């Protein structure tokens, strides 16, 4: 069966694009966080949707499970195979062509294996902004971004990946190609198939191409770091910026002192320019199509008002692009610093802004009472109510031992508070295999059963990324 399947695949792909020896497969088997390592019968590297469709037809005929994979930077183990060694990984990296930039329609049509940063650069060459931006942009791929409905740092102004997507091309579990590559901003012709595939984490179809929105490239951008003493004033500050800067507000990110201490430990060159190690450092960005001076004046006026009303205690405005980049580097390096320190227990959650203060104070208190000295690495896209509320053991305690003993109760404690505050247990990273077990309780029976019904209808053989998101 094993060699039969490989020889069938060889009828579709040149042998060099079917990786079946251990050494060639190894780079595709472990996720970015090194939390999951699986086995695979082969890793296949198709060049176009037709090849993906033929591979799926072979897999459907032989009931072989496939794992769609992009940059393998996901945080929930969605792109990692199981340990059976019977699954096939379909990595889309060879499908990396930009098919068209439609200037009048302000859209880009591109293949799923395009690296996000390359898409941003291609758009910028034509005077456009492709607003999706996240720390993994140098290696994650647009297909992976769509499949996880990735968020990142510009959601506040431009929405998440779903909001940027107008059309898709998808290969189904049966090996059919659905061509939905239309760049339409209105299309009410029945069920929205595009929205079904976006965020489905490779469990309903393989995204092979997409039509995405573009925006005019801003000509002026100002970035500032400000110090706040507590969450209530941070939210009041966000509301002030939303009121005064309206759509010019393109970034509002929070970094707690504990997050930045970790940065400082592992990347000592990344010192916080704010004085006195404030409880919260907030990175704010305004962007516009008017002059630099206009935006700067607006920023200064809002900051003055914030100082006067006691919302902030310190502020540094970046005076040039390289300083602005260094502010963003500080923010993006927290994840890398955590990885250097040891495997954190991660919680990627959203809480309504009105309940955020309550959530943080209660959850912090409960955790600190149960695990004295525990480190709470809390940072994230505060403008979206999205916290990366990550937990590390008290200093000196071994990460592995702490996680082994406490992973389940820590998650239960945090997620109980998320439920109490009517939040979500996955804001932007998805479900994958990491959150599979908790999903039924979180979504509720009816929603979970509807999800299973959709999965069964589209993939009755359960060969597309089985046991990720929902088990049927
Ligand atoms: P992969 O990890 O390869 O796959 C992710 C899931 O999508 C899997 O379930 C896989 O099966 C499925 N999939 C992949 N390609 C396809 C396809 N073509 N068709 C169907 N299914 C597919 N995420 C955020 O949302 N916001 C952030 O700010 C953010 N910051 C990050 C920072 C760092 C340093 C890192 C390492 C990760 C970060 N992430 C963030 C997580 C990750 O980068 C995103 O989830 C990203 O969208 C994954 O893209 P990928 O190409 O790596 O997908
Ligand atoms: C970010 O916002 C990413 O930097 C990573 O989503 C979050 O490391 C994390 O928990
Ligand atoms: Zn994030």
Image (cartoon, helix red, strand yellow):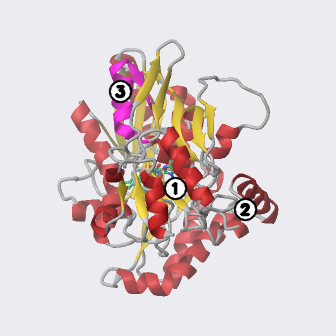
Q: Which residues are magenta?
A: 113-131
Nearer the N terminus, badge 3 or badge 2?
Answer: 3
Q: Can you tell me whether the CB of the residue at mark 1 lies under 8 Å from the nearest atom of ligand 1? A: yes
Of the residues tagged 1 and 3, which is closer to the observer? 3
Q: In x, y percent, where is residue 340?
A: 28, 67
**Residue appearing at x 34%, y 57% in the figure:** 334
Residue 259 in view, yes or no:
yes
Q: On residue 429, which mark appears?
A: 1
Q: Element at badge 2?
A: helix
Kindly identify which residue carries mark 2: 443
Q: Secondary structure at mark 1?
A: loop
Name the disc covering residue 122, or none: 3
> Is residue 126 shown in magenta?
yes
Residue 366: which quarter of the image?
Answer: bottom right
Specify whether residue 150 is in view. Answer: no
Q: How many numbered marks are there?
A: 3
């Amino acid at each position: 069966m094993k060699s039969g399947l490989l020889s069938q695949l060889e009828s579709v792909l040149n042998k060099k694009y079917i990786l079946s020896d251990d050494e060639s497969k190894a780079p595709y088997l472990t996720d970015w966080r090194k939390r999951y390592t699986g086995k695979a019968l082969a890793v296949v590297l198709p060049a176009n949707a037709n090849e993906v469709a033929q591979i799926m037809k072979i897999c459907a005929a032989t009931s072989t499970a496939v794992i769609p994979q992009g940059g393998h930077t996901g945080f929930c183990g969605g792109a990692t195979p199981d340990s059976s060694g019977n699954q096939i990984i379909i990595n889309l990296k060879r499908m990396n062509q930009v098919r068209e930039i439609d200037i009048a329609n302000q859209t880009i049509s591109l293949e799923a294996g395009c690296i996000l940063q390359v898409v941003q650069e291609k758009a910028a060459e034509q005077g456009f902004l492709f607003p999706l931006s996240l720390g993994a942009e140098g290696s994650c791929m647009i297909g992976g971004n769509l499949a996880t409905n990735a968020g990142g740092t510009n959601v506040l102004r431009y929405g998440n990946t779903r909001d940027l997507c107008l059309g898709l091309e998808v290969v189904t579990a049966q090996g059919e190609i659905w061509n939905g590559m239309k760049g339409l901003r209105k299309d009410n012709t029945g069920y929205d198939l595009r929205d079904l595939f976006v965020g489905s984490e490779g469990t309903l179809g393989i995204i092979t191409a997409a039509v995405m929105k573009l925006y005019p490239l801003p000509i002026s951008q100002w970035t500032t770091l400000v110090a706040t003493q507590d969450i209530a004033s941070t939210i009041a500050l966000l509301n002030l910026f939303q009121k005064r800067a309206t759509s010019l507000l393109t970034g509002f990110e929070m970094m707690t002192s504990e997050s930045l201490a970790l940065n400082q430990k592992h990347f000592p060159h990344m010192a916080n320019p704010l004085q006195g190690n404030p409880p919260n450092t907030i990175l704010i960005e305004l962007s516009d199509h008017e002059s630099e001076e206009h935006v700067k004046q607006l920023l200064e006026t809002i900051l003055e008002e914030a100082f006067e009303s006691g919302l902030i205690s310190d502020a540094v405005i970046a005076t040039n692009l390289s300083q602005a980049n260094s502010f963003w580097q500080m923010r993006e390096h927290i994840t890398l610093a955590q990885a250097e320190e040891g495997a954190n227990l991660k919680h990627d959650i959203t809480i309504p802004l009105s309940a955020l203060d309550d959530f943080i104070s209660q959850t912090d208190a409960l955790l600190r009472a149960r695990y004295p000295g525990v480190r709470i690495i809390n940072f994230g896209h505060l403008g979206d109510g999205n916290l990366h509320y990550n937990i590390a053991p008290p200093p000196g305690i071994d990460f592995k031992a702490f996680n082994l003993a406490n992973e389940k109760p820590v998650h239960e404690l945090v997620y109980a508070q998320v439920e109490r505050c009517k939040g979500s247990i996955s804001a932007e990273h998805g479900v994958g295999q990491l959150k599979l077990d908790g999903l039924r309780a979180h979504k509720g029976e009816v929603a979970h059963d509807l999800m299973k019904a959709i999965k069964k209808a589209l993939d009755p053989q359960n060969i597309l990324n089985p046991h990720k998101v929902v088990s049927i």
